[in-house]
Image (cartoon, rainbow, N blue to C red):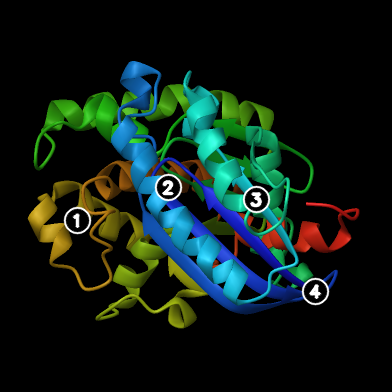
Amino acid sequence: MRVAAVDCGTNSIRLLIADADETTLTDVVREMVVVRLGQGVDATGQFAPEAIERTRDALAGYVQQMRAHGVERVRMVATSATRDASNRDDFFSMTADLLGQVVPGAVAEVISGEEEAALSFRGAVGDLDPADGPFVVTDLGGGSTEIVTDAAAYSANIGCVRLTEHCLHSDPPTADEIAAAESFIDERLEPAFAAVDVSAVRTWVGVAGTLTTIAALDLGLPEYDSVAIHLSRHGLDDVERVCDRLVAATRAERLALGPMHPGRADVIGGGSLVTNALAREFASRAHLTEMVVSEHDILDGIALGLVAAPDGP
């Protein structure tokens, strides 16, 4: 069955078109566009009209591809920013108009942080050896960070866009801004680790753009290469070194890095601070020494779920 999964987050909107059975996906199209849907949501509680328009343009392109590739089922999920926006009905109206061109009645859904975590876990561990488990998966997004094991999950309201807008206003950020950001992160990760016991975890799996970009930089790649990044392993000391470099850099210096997406350069410093905090927690609580990075994530979890779904959109 040919299916399409769309993940609309705070920073980017992503598409996976795949041929799927209940356990296997074969990619047809996998794309990402930075639309910054969550622009200013943390401060205003609303989507900016220009952010909705950027998202409309990207989704319209995805819909064209779905129709061209003969997609039979589609599911679009929206996550942190959409959970927080008071004018989300404007967003839903736009997505219904477009997705209905592929499958009549198809609409975007706002999913809970817990479902987001479960879908990310399913997608992230599919290519890993079960003998390397138990796993903990972290999905570090623009507005939230999900921490999930096979037994528990927690969605913390901390992500690269939210943290940057809240704390990191200078270029590069000042020492006081970094200290404030680290305190902000610790406040939000404390209940996450109280809810998710990681003491028995043997492998940390990181997904989403901040962590895959950090992996690319640690590998010394001249440009972003998803094949080289997928399932690569990174010592936590090396992760910290890359993150510290990104936090200290200006936006222009980050943009000059070959694997850096232009839409990520202004917020990856915030994502790096979250990454360092996660690394410290996993080192102290589970004695982990490395991070495995997966290119497969919530999109793959959504797509696999469509195969088992009942007939309908």
Mark 4 and mark 3 residues within 8 Å of each other at the beta carbon: no
Q: Can residue 95 be seen in this view?
A: yes
Q: Can residue 198 be seen in this view?
A: no
| Residue ID for mark 2 | 56
Give percent across and percent down for residue 284.
52, 43
Mark 1 and mark 4 residues within 8 Å of each other at the beta carbon: no
Categorize mark 4 by other alpha carbons within 10 Å: few (<14), some (14-19), many (20+): some
Q: Estimate the spatial distance between the alpha carbons at disc 4 and disc 2, rounded to whole Å.
A: 26 Å
Tag 4 or tag 1, which sits nearer the N-term? 4
Mark 4 and mark 2 residues within 8 Å of each other at the beta carbon: no
Tag 3 or tag 2, which sits nearer the N-term? 2
Secondary structure type for disc 3 = loop
> What residue type is disc 1 on?
Arg
| Residue ID for mark 4 | 1
| Residue ID for mark 1 | 245
4 vs 2, front mark: 2
> What residue type is disc 4 on?
Met
Q: Quadrant of residue 224?
A: bottom left
Which circle marks residue 100 in the picture?
3
> What residue type is disc 3 on?
Gly
